[in-house]
Image (cartoon, rainbow, N blue to C red):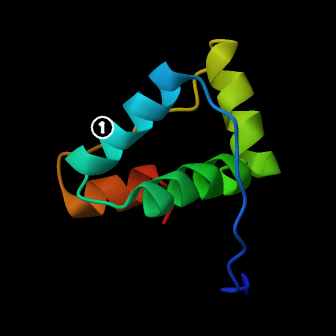
């Protein structure tokens, strides 16, 4: 579990980046702290697992994984092997 203890820190950022962060936080109705924290968590923990990395590489290499039938729920499940 992630600790909820907070520490004050400071960063030196270019004005344009700080302005952009503030504007985006405002658009999303978030505090600047909350918005930056979410960005950092996404950057830190958005790491694909081995299976996903393999699928990404196959896709980039043009390897076709198969067809998903979306004509019905039963056909969809069957095309996924469920």
Question: Which residue is at 32% across, 54% downward?
Answer: 76
| Residue 74 makes an appearance in the image | yes
View extreme (right): residue: 50
Decide which of 62, 77 is in the foreground and name it: 62
What is the secondary structure assignment of the residue under circle 1? helix
Q: Is residue 3 above or below residue 53?
A: below
Q: Quadrant of residue 23?
A: top left
Question: Which residue is at 42% across, 54% downward?
Answer: 32
Indicate left or right for 53 with 56 as reference.
right
View extreme (top): residue: 62
Q: Residues within 10 Å of mark 1 (few under 14, many from 20)?
A: few
Q: Is residue 15 above or below residue 40?
A: above
Question: Which residue is at 46% across, 63% downward?
Answer: 34
The percent coordinates of residue 22 (x first, y second) are 37, 41
Q: Which residue is mark 1?
A: 23
On-image quarter of the N terminus:
bottom right
The percent coordinates of residue 25 (x first, y second) are 34, 48
Q: Number of callouts in the render? A: 1
| Residue 63 makes an appearance in the image | no
Decide which of 54, 72 is in the foreground and name it: 54
The percent coordinates of residue 80 (x first, y second) are 47, 54
Decide which of 66, 27 is in the foreground and name it: 27
Q: Is residue 70 above or below residue 1?
A: above
The percent coordinates of residue 21 (x first, y second) are 43, 38
């Amino acid at each position: 579990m992630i600790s909820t203890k907070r520490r004050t820190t400071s960063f030196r950022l270019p004005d344009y980046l700080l302005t952009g962060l503030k504007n985006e936080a405002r658009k999303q109705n978030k505090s600047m702290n909350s918005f930056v924290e979410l960005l950092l968590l996404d950057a830190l923990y958005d790491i694909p697992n081995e299976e996903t990395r393999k699928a990404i590489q196959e896709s980039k290499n043009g390897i076709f994984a198969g067809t998903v039938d979306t004509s019905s729920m039963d056909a969809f499940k069957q095309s996924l092997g469920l």
